[in-house]
Amino acid sequence: MNNTIPHAGSVLKNYIGGEFVSSDMLFDNVNPVDGTIINQVAEANQQMVDQAVIAAQSALHGEWGKLSLEQRCKLLHKVADGIDARFDEFVTAEMADTGKSFFQARTIDIPRGAANFKIFADMVKSQSSECFHTDTPDGKGALNYAVNKPLGVVAVIAPWNLPLLLMTWKLAPAMAAGNVIIAKPSEETPATATLLAEVMHDAGIPKGVFNLVHGFGHKSAGEFLTTHKGVDAITFTGESSTGSAIMKASADGVKALSFELGGKNAGIIFDDCDFDEAVAGTARSVFTNGGQVCLCTERLYVHRSIFDKFVDALKVKAEALNIGWPLDESTDMGPVISHKHRDKVLAYYQSAIDDGATVITGGGAPSFGDARDNGAFVQPTIFTGLSEQSKIVKEEVFGPVCHITPFDDEDEAIAMANDSDYGLAATVWTTNLQRAHRVAGQMDVGICWVNSWYLRDLRTPFGGMKLSGVGREGGVHSLNFYSEPTNICIKL
Ligand code: NAD
């Protein structure tokens, strides 16, 4: 594999109306493994966002809007093929921006990024619409049917944890449904979105259909987009507090909103679980991507009869994790995304210790004695002994950490798991079939896994309750969000 980081040492540009454009405001893109600067990023100003909106609107009413569904889907397949053709570059860029392991970038992030285009291009061809025959007083009746049209200009605002995967999870269905896009990646992870713009360009996506603006949220490209009169819909993945800010900022425009927000996900481990599978699955659900997946488990509830044995076994798994260089094949876990985020995670660790937690393992930052000491690493950490009201048990940390609480009966476990402002995901470990159905159905979440974690079927509804989001993505749910149905009533 070629490990040269694409655009290393140069400037990552915006992509507006089919042109790559720089700006006079540059910010650094930092590698969280060793704190080095990978390249610089051209921040889009208000005028550039205005230009992107105009370019998108003209594409919607121009060539793109006139393509047949078949032609549109062929182009989306070309985008997927373009990602595959530059697979190594995407993997290297994603690793440099995030510090995630080579294994994860090449088996999850980039393949799923490409697959999203293929899946939604194929799925949109079988999107159905409603049709009703309606009785009328004259006995002749009327026919009602709905036709789907695109929403228009869609702002796609993405986070840094799974940069290409989550951006394309929104882009692909939006484009499949005929929309035009202005995408803003996280300021922490601008690289793969820039490569994607190059792939779109080379695939012949008409100019203005896909625009990319770089920058931050408040008083930057993010806010310019969410408050823009020409933006018809906003699809956002990120923190719940940012979702709330976007909802307020976009309220005057009454825009369509789809929000995938934070989580504080619970795992319940019953004494009748397959113990080894429960430990291995829980370790994955706590520590994958350094705990920086919205679906990661941060609260564990373990039946008292197996509590000590489970804590000991999870400790062994945590201490066996190899923390290190992304390119090292044996690396299980990289750094967190930035020094700022490392400080936030470490402050949560300290708050747990101040609250009187028992530190089972971790609780601080590792020391390597090499360049990684300039990076943003934290230790995989397990706490026990805190009250359910402790800050670290209540708030999303978004790091490789969990707190484990014992329980005595099923109702108590369900009540503790549901006692959260969030409602994204849960996991239940049991071999009792009735219990599995009974407990899973009572979880106040958008997705509940039984005896697994992160087992995804992209056709299923995905999203959160409470502070975890608004709406559902996945399969027909995504296509429906990105489509505006017009009902046509024909008197027969
Ligand atoms: P974030 O909210 O800080 O940023 C996300 C994006 O929003 C970035 O592109 C950022 O620049 C932009 N942004 C920030 N403020 C903005 C504003 N005022 N207006 C417009 N845009 C703004 O989130 P993050 O730190 O990048 O991501 C981590 C969070 O995302 C965690 O809370 C995690 O749980 C959540 N997440 C949720 C899901 C899900 O599917 N539910 C998936 C992944 C991540």
Image (spheres, grey):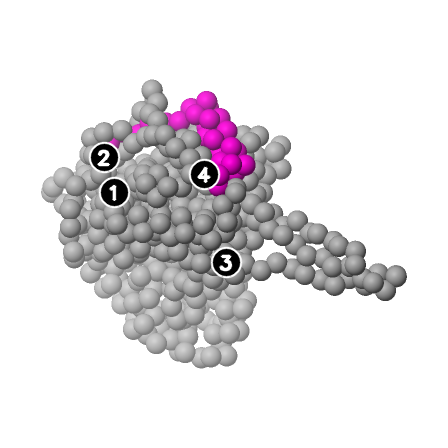
x and y percentages locating residue 331 in the rendered image: 19, 54
Q: Rounded to the nearest whole Å, what is the CA distance between mark 2 and mark 4? A: 24 Å
Q: Secondary structure at mark 1?
A: helix
Is 439 on the left-hand or right-hand side of 41? right
Q: Are there few (<14), some (14-19), or many (20+) residues within 10 Å of tag 1?
A: many
Q: Rounded to the nearest whole Å, what is the CA distance between mark 1 and mark 4? A: 24 Å
**What amino acid type should be assigned to the residue bearing mark 4?**
Val
**What amino acid type should be assigned to the residue bearing mark 2?**
His
Q: Which mark is residue 43?
A: none
Residue that protrudes farthest toward the left in the picture: 369
Q: Are there few (<14), some (14-19), or many (20+) residues within 10 Å of tag 3?
A: few
Q: Rounded to the nearest whole Å, what is the CA distance between mark 3 and mark 2? A: 37 Å
Looking at the rendered image, the quarter that the C terminus falls into is bottom right
Q: Rounded to the nearest whole Å, what is the CA distance between mark 4 and mark 3? A: 20 Å
Q: Which residue is mark 1?
A: 93
Task: Please check the rendered image and state whether residue 60 is part of the magenta-colored stretch, yes or no.
Answer: yes
Q: Are there few (<14), some (14-19), or many (20+) residues within 10 Å of tag 2?
A: some
Q: Which residue is mark 3?
A: 125
Q: Which residue is mark 4?
A: 209
Q: Nearer the viewer, residue 429 or 158?
A: 158
- At horizontal 61% and vertical 58% (from top left) the residue drawn is 129
Mark 4 and mark 3 in contact? Answer it, CB < 8 Å: no
Chain part drawn in magenta: 38-64
